[in-house]
Image (cartoon, rainbow, N blue to C red):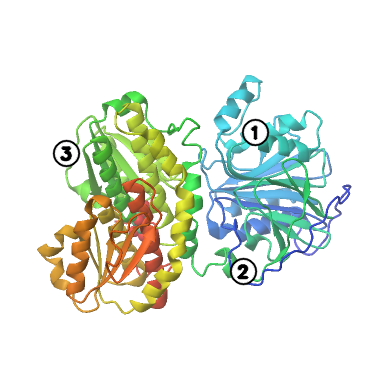
Amino acid sequence: MRRGGQSYPCSCDVQQRGVVRVGCFVPTLSIAAGTIPGMCGIAGYVGPRNAVEVVFDQLKRLEYRGYDSAGIAYLNGTDAIHVLKRAGKLSELGRLLDEKTPESGIAIGHSRWATHGAPTDENAHPHHDRYEDIVLIHNGIVENYLELKQELLREGHTFRSETDTEVAAHVIGREFAQGVPLEEAVRRAAKRMRGAFAFVVFSRREPAKFVAARNFSPLIIGLGEGENMVASDVPALLPYTRRVTYLEDDRIAVVTCEGVTVTDLDGKVLEALVDEIQWDIEAAEKGGYEHFMLKEIHEQPDVVRQCLAGRIDEHARVRLDNAFSETVWQEVDRVNIIACGSAYHAGLMGKYLFERELRLPTDVFYSSEFRYGDPLLSPKSLAVFISQSGETIDSLAALRLCKQRRIRTLGIVNVVGSSIARECDRTVFTQAGPEISVASTKAYLAQCLVLELLALHIAQVREMPGIRIEQEAGRLSGLADKLALALEVEGRMQEVAQAQKDARLAFFLGRNADAHVTREAALKLKEVAYVPTQECPAGEMKHGPLALIEQGTLAVFGATDPEVRDKLASNVKEVQARGGYALVVTTDDDGSLDGVGDELVRVPATGSPYLDALLAVVPLQLLAYHLARARGCEIDQPRTLAKSVTVE
Ligand code: G6P
């Protein structure tokens, strides 16, 4: 590949039909709606430079987000679309590019974080349609891809990958083959797809433009002089331009080197506002947030959407594609959940749910204890391994022990293609996207959601009377919006953190699910703010821990469960009577705790005790973050801790 400042002719033959007009100028660091990155990286360029070089550089600038494969498509002349893609690091793709030295005036590129199918060359983007007329990159999830795939298979289409993206490429290609312009083909196809997604597509038959479409997943168009580009995230654009327009939901953009036209799904041309990016590169990598931890906390509404995508159908039935058959779920008589750290805390939530709702005996083990504990394992039991990384050595060793003992194993894992994901009999992915901060936030949330989906799935299979699956599924569907509201307490948590920054000890107390969530919140505070914590069920306080409360001790109470609120109110009083400072988190549908504690924070009520307790983690994650910040701690990489613990 030629390096350096050469320019390449761009064969733009498309008239500029609409212009992007300068609208509001946003001079602040505030986060524009929809700029939270999705899971994968999207890049695209059309203009006089060598587009392949530009797109490769843009992908490098998105590397910080994590990915497991990457690819580029470009047009050399107008004869054919060339696609180069490789599993693994970008350097693998770079080697391929160096061999071919491609040059082009248009290219699109993608770094993939696997959600459908393992991180292989075949599953990497871009993907072609049936006729190799178009090529597509995609972020997000097409929820109804299986249904669309069946339809296409009946029509004789064949597929090379396991991805929903290839299905989307075939749907667009089928429309394009009808003779409509590419833009119209994308529009028609977008109307057929459900889910949260962003696409960029180009065709050898309309060679000087790409068409981008957005539904929930972010897509940003960069505006240059005689060149234009597209990316999923700001850092990819910054070396080339600071003028951008954020594509809104249900919008289609046609991008040529001369201009950008934005239309709605009916083809009506719309005005698009231009923003001037003020961030430096480092801030942009974090989406304008100071730390990855804060960014990941704020990504959680999107994580809920991604995690649930395609898993609750229109009849409110839970679909877990990769779980066991119905016979297995009928047979399982005991569950052992095995995990470490935050994943262990998610496991405690699983026990709460399985025993309370399904009456299914469940134990939770630290992986390191399980593997050396000579565990009692019944042949009909199920071992569930929860892990963000899928590589934690103790969890992996415990998994191998279960396999030796011929126990069924199920993984709840974030990283597709990881060891635990590969070695478990079945794996359900949390679909939380790459988590970079050492302290887990969004992955924990997604693990708890998958456990809820699993519980509903088992209840469905077992046709359990008394569990209103439709109602619970409806609550899950409304959760993302409630989570966004829960994040609004940030200002108050910042004030509490400032006031409590010199705390020498913090108690975390709750009952039932609240006890498990506050235990996770305590871990956050320990990990990032280095505050010693004492976490226990609130009723256990009197049996020892209460002796540690003194003037100024911080005590955090999870108080979302209406069944035990009165009891908890008494525990708050016990703490205050000894000079402790009580922060209480409850739901917004209850007034019984008004005036209780020194600070009362409310999260939106969901109607489900499990989800209420889970939402309470959000203000407490923010508390840990802001307390750490107030104490000047290294937040994303706390001292002596690692993101993935692959040594014993
Ligand atoms: C480390 C991380 C924690 C994580 C734990 C388990 O301690 O710092 O955030 O919860 O490992 O990791 P896993 O990848 O198995 O979920």
Q: Disc 3 and disc 1: Cα gap in Å?
A: 50 Å
Q: Residue at x 41, y 34 (%)?
A: 470
Residue 128 visible in the current orientation: no
The quadrant where residue 472 appears: top left
Q: Which residue is mark 1?
A: 192
User: Residue 422: where, in percent of width, then height?
Assistant: 41, 39
| Label 3 sits on residue | 376
Mark 3 burial class by Cα count in 10 Å: few <14, some 14-19, many 20+: few
Give whichever of discs 2 and 1 has the lower sequence position. 1
Classify residue 564 as left or right of residue 315.
left
Residue 641 coordinates in the image, percent (x, y): 35, 65
Front: mark 2 or 1: 1
* Between discs 3 and 1, the one toward the N terminus: 1
Secondary element at tag 3? loop
In the rendered structure, which disc, 3 or 2, sits on the residue that comes first in sequence? 2
Picture quarter with the N terminus: bottom right
Q: Is residue 459 visible?
A: yes
Give amino acid for label 1.
Arg
Q: Residue at x 57, y 28 (%)?
A: 147
Under circle 2, the secondary element is helix
User: Looking at the image, is 19 positioned above or below residue 378?
Assistant: below
Under circle 1, the secondary element is helix
Relative to 522, is 121 above or below? Answer: above
Tags 3 and 1 in contact by the CB under 8 Å rule?
no
Instruction: Look at 17% across and 75% down and name the residue there.
Output: 578
Mark 2 → mark 1, Cα distance in angstroms: 37 Å
- Quadrant of residue 542 in the image? bottom left
The amino acid beneath tag 3 is Leu
Residue under label 2, please give it: 281
Q: Is residue 504 left or right of residue 487?
A: left
